[in-house]
Amino acid sequence: MPIVYGDAVITDRDHQKRCTDSGEDVELKHLRAFVALAEELHFGRAAAHLHIVQPALSAQIRALEDDVGAQLFERDRHRVELTEEGALFLPEALATLRQARRAREVLQQAAAGEVGVLRLAFVSSTLSHLLPELVRTLEQRYPRIELDLKDMPSLPQARALLDNALDFGLVRLPLNVSGVNTRMLFEESLVVALPQDNPLCSQRRIQPQDLAGCPVLVLARKYAPGLYDQMLAGFHRRKITLTIAREMGEFTTQLALVAAGLGVGILPSGAASALPMGVVTRPLALAMSGAGIGVAWTGLETPRKRALMQVLDELYPASTPELTGGL
């Protein structure tokens, strides 16, 4: 294979017949001239494609043939054709130019800080939409930024951010942790998950008082303290006491117990995107201001961190100001 070195390539003798000097350097501009002429088979058109005059193209082709020690074209007044050596050389020249372009792109991206690893944690309810969309867009826009992904509850994410063990978190808001910045990406309402034979399924919307006396399954406070506290405060304002039967560590476990008839579940709408058989959801008429999914971080000091934030800003334009960590 050809080897790129600076602005030149050193050709491999295994791929170059009759090369007279294995130490000769072949300039990239000569390879570009060769490829253009091989594609056009016409000096005038090839020179126009390269934005040079025809004598300059002829000189570059002659210089390349002298360097490799082989005639690459048969040419007379009426035609230009690749020789056998030229036909063998063409795929190698194309590969070398591609490699040179790739090397330049890598260097440019590295200089811009768009190369490296970003450590990103997420709550599981982002798996259905947000996380795949973010990963897909970031890979398309910044292919040399690698994501190290971790499934992690919101509060451990905040601790990991403060310990510099993470760069970003996709968290459930509100999340008030001193030193951690957050921004809402999208708000979520609450839904009630019910066994399909529960009488409440006949209602299009569940009122908070409808749940009085029902065994309720919720996500444990230690996993989403802001969500937990807001939910209980909403019921308290209505002077309704929830009967919390179990506090769960995962929404999937919560839904499985609902399917088993062990209670009804209260959870964010995004966490109910994949329901087990026999479970239905209904909206809960309980306002949850500032509840939803957001991004959390402690600093944007590197270009690749700013690149990820830029992608999130484009996917989810800010409709509310940034929320800073609690004091």
Image (cartoon, grey):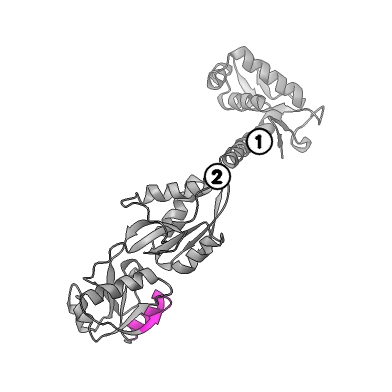
- 180 or 150, which lies in front? 180
Secondary structure beneath label 2: loop
Crowd rating for badge 1 (residues with CA inside 10 Å; few <14, some 14–19, many 20+): many
Classify the position of the N terminus by image quarter: top right
Tell me, yes or no, if residue 112 can be seen here. yes
Question: Residue 81 at what x, y percent from top left?
Answer: 63, 23
- Residue 250 highlighted magenta (yes or no): yes
The residue at 66%/35% (across/down) is 96
Question: Residue 119 at what x, y percent from top left?
Answer: 54, 58
- Please tell me whether the stretch drawn in magenta is mainly helix, strand or loop: helix
Q: Is residue 37 above or below residue 194?
A: above
Number of labels in the image equals 2
Crowd rating for badge 2 (residues with CA inside 10 Å; few <14, some 14–19, many 20+): many
Label 2 amino acid? Answer: Glu
Q: Mark 1 points at which residue?
A: 96
Q: Are marks 2 and 1 in contact (CB under 8 Å)?
A: no
Classify the position of the C terminus by image quarter: bottom left
Label 1 amino acid? Answer: Thr
Q: Earlier in the sequence, mark 2 or mark 1?
A: 1
Answer with left or right where residue 40 lies relative to residue 169: right
Q: Is residue 91 above or below residue 223?
A: above
The residue at 32%/52% (across/down) is 320
Q: Name the residue under label 2.
A: 114
Q: Is residue 206 above or below residue 49?
A: below
For discs 2 and 1, the disc positioned in front in the rendered view: 2
The residue at 57%/41% (across/down) is 109
Q: Quadrant of residue 70?
A: top right
Answer with left or right where residue 324 lies relative to residue 236: right
The residue at 43%/46% (across/down) is 310
Q: Which segment is the magenta one?
A: 246-260
